[in-house]
Image (cartoon, rainbow, N blue to C red):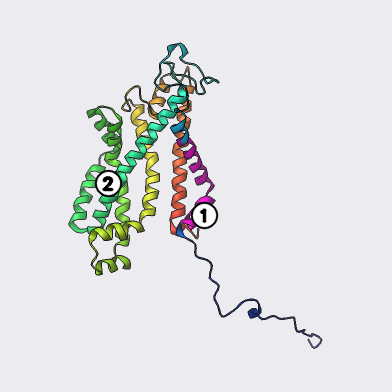
Amino acid sequence: MEDIKFLDDDFQLVGDKQDITKDVVSPAKPAWKDALGRFCKNKGAVIGCAVILIITLLAIFAPMFSSWKFDAIDTSMKNIGPCAKHWFGTDTYGRDLWVRIWTGTRYSLFIAVVAIFIDVVVGITYGLISGYFGGMVDSVLQRIQEIINSIPTLVVLTLLLMVMKSSLFTIILALSFTEWIGMSRITRAQVLKVKEDEFVLASRTLGASDFFIIFKEILPNIYSQMIIMVMMSIPNAIFYEAYLSFVGLGLPIPLASLGTLINDGFNSFLVYPYMMMIPVVIFSLLMLSFNLFGDGLRDALDPTMKEM
């Protein structure tokens, strides 16, 4: 040990390169950038989002730029398989399936989105009122919800469409009748979780009205769960619409949706399988993509997923 000699530059003070009297704080990162970064790391969610975007664009623009009409009947061209002239072939009435399938996809997406929008408005409002006021108001509202929810959704939809005439409005109304219950339950649970927090108590102490507290204090703090629930509900609405159309309770002729197209193709599946297989593939891609997208949103918007 006596032979060891230290030179002047063997050791350097940390203060020579960094001011140890000041804390180094990482730059602030907005919540939406943080959520976007986590979402982009989820490859399944990104692929699902891209597939939804592609299918939506095709549903909007493909029929617009085609020379064929979705309801134009020409029996001289019936049952033609996929070819250069008819990319998805033609059906038993000679209608071009390329235009007809994307038009049907457009109707299915429109029905699902409108029905979910109604469910969001009704369900969130119902859940906010029930969870915030509690007591007798909560008990009455929950009993009403339990009565409606005790009847299976498909039974309610089928009975409603059997009573009313099949139309676009009827299907949207039928889908809106029960789908709001799930949204209401999630909203109520989130309200019960945050309504006793300090910022809500502070607003109440300062004399804020119930309306202000519900929509200005509570709702902005639970919106992430609402977005996740919406994305999870859209595939359910698409499924129910397809089911109703498949059993003959869907859109009236000559309108089409993915469900009616699958039903039409089912009747000729053994002879012309492409009539059913193509809409089934698009329907499956749509359902899978929405589920992947919803899972990605849940992981991105849920703060508890940061450390996982």
The disc, 1 or 2, on the residue closer to the chain's N-terminal end is 1
Amino acid tagged 1: Gly
**How far is the residue under mark 1 from the one under mark 2?**
32 Å
* Residue in front for this viewpoint, 32 or 189: 32
Give the residue number, with chain letter if any, for mark 1.
37
Percent across and percent down for residue 144 are: 21, 47
For the record, the magenta segment spans: 32-56
- Counting other residues with Cα less than 10 Å from the Cα at mark 2, is it few (<14), some (14-19), or many (20 or more)? some
Q: Please state if 126 lies on the left or on the right of 66 as rendered.
A: left
| Relative depth, front residue between 28 and 238 | 28
Residue 105 part of the magenta segment: no
Mark number displayed over residue 122: 2
Secondary structure that dominates the magenta span? helix
Residue 49 rendering spot, x and y as whole percentages: 48, 43
Residue at the spot 46% in from the left edge and 53% down from the top edge:
299
> Which quadrant does the N terminus fall into?
bottom right
Q: Is 44 a magenta residue? A: yes
Residue at figure coordinates x 37%, y 35% from the top left: 110
